[in-house]
């Protein structure tokens, strides 16, 4: 990257960011809950005790490794699986009661305990890692890369910006993101860091509009002096609650709810266009980053922002197509996030070296052509 900077190939100003799920090096069937993991852990501990005494284990089930050395590696993976499963169970307790599941349904992969369980592009549920890349818009260089043990892109933008600064010594000025990838927390962070973010707010280009759309939050007038909103019918919404929502990456976002009582809404002539609730009235939620979000929406509605955003698809999507189709990166070769990061880093290194090599050859050809022209002119 520093060679590319010195050669003038990149200025590290504008990049397109996106991620793609890649299968981890683990079985898509061998998942264990806490009870079964504890049972196998006990059997493996007994077998390793026999190995230490120099005696063959009394029982070697089909799932257990067959040699003392391989059982030692399996023991380490099971230890990681126990720690990871304990973390998943602790995090699950912070979910809302409506989203909580039975403890025995929380499972972990023993082949790659760090991998997340999710659905890949082929609609197969399996252990996954998400590779993230940021490619420069004005050159084919990949400015940053990383692998995250999760099945989505949520919460990966801030660490990717730090990764680029670590690799290049510079911070991006503009970032192009996928539709709906940027959250309110991400938009506020970019505004704080003076990074221009390009990307629709919670939009999907292929989604069809509803047949009978209801009034949106944008159609409610915000009253700064009263710190509340007024609905299209003229009713002032009262504050009815405040909650702190957990976001990916350990982040939090404060959301305030405003609403109107049910009888007031039921008597309103605009009720069919405003709410479908049969008992309560209309309510809206306002983020602590609402002002920044509205400013971002207004910015993305301009022709300038739309023109820049059109460059995203043709810039970043070709990276994943090249990695998966031409370099065979549809499944990681090593187990664990450290080996997956190393594999992706080598792929990116090869890509950037080829880009730099081609650029150097082009510069050499230009110099030779200019030299020939000068000789002819002389």
Image (tube, helix red, strand yellow):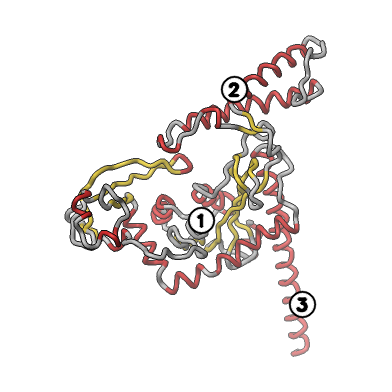
Q: Is residue 193 left or right of residue 125?
A: left
Image quadrant for the C terminus? bottom right
The residues bearing labels 3 and 2 have C-alpha atoms spaced at a distance of 71 Å
- How many neighbours does mark 2 have within 10 angstroms: few (below 14), some (14-19), or many (20 or more)? few
Callout 2: SS: helix
Which residue bears the numbered disc 2? 35
Where does residue 180 sit, x and y in percent of width and height? 47, 57
The residues bearing labels 3 and 1 have C-alpha atoms spaced at a distance of 35 Å
Q: Sequence order check: which comes first, mark 3 or mark 2?
A: 2
Name the front one of labels 3 and 1.
1
Residue 171: image tag: 1
Callout 3: SS: helix
Please tell me which residue lies in front, 374 or 65.
Answer: 65
Q: Is residue 206 left or right of residue 345?
A: left
Q: Name which residue lies at 55% across and 48% down.
A: 152
Please tell me which residue lies in front, 33 or 52.
Answer: 33
| Tags 3 and 2 touching, CB below 8 Å | no
Residue 368: image tag: 3
Please tell me which residue lies in front, 297 or 281.
Answer: 281
Q: Sequence order check: which comes first, mark 3 or mark 1?
A: 1
Q: Quadrant of residue 106?
A: top right
| Tags 3 and 1 touching, CB below 8 Å | no
- Residue 52 versus residue 375 in the image, above or below: above
Where does residue 275 sit, x and y in percent of width and height? 30, 56
- How many neighbours does mark 3 have within 10 angstroms: few (below 14), some (14-19), or many (20 or more)? few
Callout 1: SS: loop
Name the front one of labels 3 and 2.
2
Q: Name which residue lies at 57% across and 29% down.
A: 85
Residue 213: image tag: none
């Amino acid at each position: 990257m520093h060679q590319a900077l010195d050669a003038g190939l990149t200025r590290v100003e504008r990049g397109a960011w996106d991620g793609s799920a890649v299968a981890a090096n683990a079985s898509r069937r061998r998942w264990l809950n806490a009870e079964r993991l504890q049972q196998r852990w006990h059997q493996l501990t007994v077998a390793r005790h026999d190995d230490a005494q120099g005696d063959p284990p009394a029982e070697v089930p089909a799932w257990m490794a067959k040699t003392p050395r391989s059982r030692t590696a399996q023991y380490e993976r099971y230890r990681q699986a126990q720690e990871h499963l304990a973390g998943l169970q602790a995090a699950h307790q912070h979910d809302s009661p409506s989203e909580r599941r039975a403890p025995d349904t929380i499972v972990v992969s023993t082949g790659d305990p760090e991998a997340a369980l999710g659905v890949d592009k082929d609609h197969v549920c399996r252990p996954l890692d998400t590779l993230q890349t940021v490619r420069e818009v004005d050159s084919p260089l990949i400015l940053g890369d990383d692998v995250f043990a999760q099945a989505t892109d949520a919460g990966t933008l801030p660490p990717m910006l730090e990764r680029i600064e670590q690799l290049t010594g510079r911070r991006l000025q503009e970032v192009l993101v996928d539709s709906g990838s940027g959250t309110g927390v991400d938009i506020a962070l970019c505004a704080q860091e003076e990074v221009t973010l390009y990307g629709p707010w919670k939009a999907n280009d292929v989604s069809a509009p509803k047949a009978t759309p209801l009034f949106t939050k944008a159609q409610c007038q915000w009253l700064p002096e009263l710190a509340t909103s007024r609905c299209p019918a003229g009713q002032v919404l009262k504050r009815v609650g405040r909650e702190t929502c957990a976001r990916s990456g350990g982040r939090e976002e404060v959301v305030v709810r405003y609403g109107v009582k049910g009888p007031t809404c039921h008597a309103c002539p605009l009720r069919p266009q405003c709410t479908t609730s049969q008992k309560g009235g209309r309510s809206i939620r306002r983020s602590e980053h609402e002002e920044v979000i509205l400013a971002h929406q207004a910015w993305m509605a301009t022709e300038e922002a739309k023109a820049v955003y059109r460059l995203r698809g043709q810039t970043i999507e070709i990276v994943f197509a090249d990695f998966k189709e031409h370099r065979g990166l549809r499944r990681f070769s090593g187990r664990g996030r450290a080996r997956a990061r190393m594999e992706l880093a080598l792929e990116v290194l090869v890509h950037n070296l080829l880009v730099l090599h081609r650029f150097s050859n082009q510069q050499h050809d230009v110099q030779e052509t200019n030299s020939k022209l000068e000789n002819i002119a002389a």
